[in-house]
Image (tube, rainbow, N blue to C red):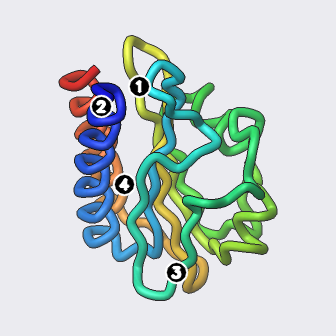
Amino acid sequence: MHLIMEVKDMQRAFQEILEGLLESTAASRTTVRLDMPSKNLHLDTVAAEALAPGVRSLKEDTSINNLSKVPTYEFVERERRILVQNDCLTADPAPPAALIDLYDVKAQMLGPIMLDDSVIGIISVHYTLGPREWTEKDVAALQNAIERVRRTLEQRG
């Protein structure tokens, strides 16, 4: 029971962080995915999500699985830095086809969540209205959200 309460408490904190990120970047969707089996959190499952009105949720998604083998995630894990993609149709590395075809993502930013010098998750910022030039302010907002999630994990870890 304690673990369930702890995870729910973390998810509430993540939700607040993601809602702020959604608003500050004028995005369509923001998500947190974590690989923390000890807390029953897995990379292929969305731990928390914030959505703009009318945007489809990824929470119950099963079309994007084995995320650790997706080129965009591999990039973030290898480079340990934010990946900015202004146009997902021409982006390299290519996002998962389902993200574009099923969830209409046109532009995205992905950032690594680091703990103990390891990438243990990712925050995604999706935009569905068309290609988009992400600004320095948008990237800074994502970096701030990454730091806040990391501090939450350290405090409740």
Q: Which residue is mark 3?
A: 55
Type of amino acid under label 3: Val
Q: Nearer the viewer, mark 3 or mark 2?
A: 3
Of pointers 4 and 3, the one earlier in the residue sequence = 3
- For the residues labelled 4 and 1, the Cα–Cα distance comes to 17 Å
Q: Evaluate if marks 3 and 2 touch, with contact meaning CB atoms under 8 Å apart.
A: no
Q: Which residue is mark 2?
A: 150
- Is 149 located above or below residue 55 in the figure? above
Type of amino acid under label 1: Met
Expressed as whole percent of the image width and height from the top left, the position of residue 16 reads: 23, 57
Observer-nearest of 112 and 13: 13
Observer-nearest of 47 and 117: 47
Q: Nearer the viewer, mark 4 or mark 3?
A: 3
- For the residues labelled 3 and 2, the Cα–Cα distance comes to 26 Å
Expressed as whole percent of the image width and height from the top left, the position of residue 133 reads: 49, 71
Q: Which residue is mark 1?
A: 114
- Is 156 located above or below residue 89 in the figure? above
- For the residues labelled 4 and 3, the Cα–Cα distance comes to 22 Å
- Is 6 located above or below residue 44 in the figure? above
The mark found on residue 85 in the picture is none
- Is 115 located above or below residue 153 in the figure? above
- For the residues labelled 1 and 3, the Cα–Cα distance comes to 28 Å
Instruction: State left or right for residue 125 relative to residue 58.
Output: left
Pick the quarter of the image with the N terminus: top left
Q: Secondary structure at mark 2?
A: helix
Q: Residue at x 70, y 40 (%)?
A: 67
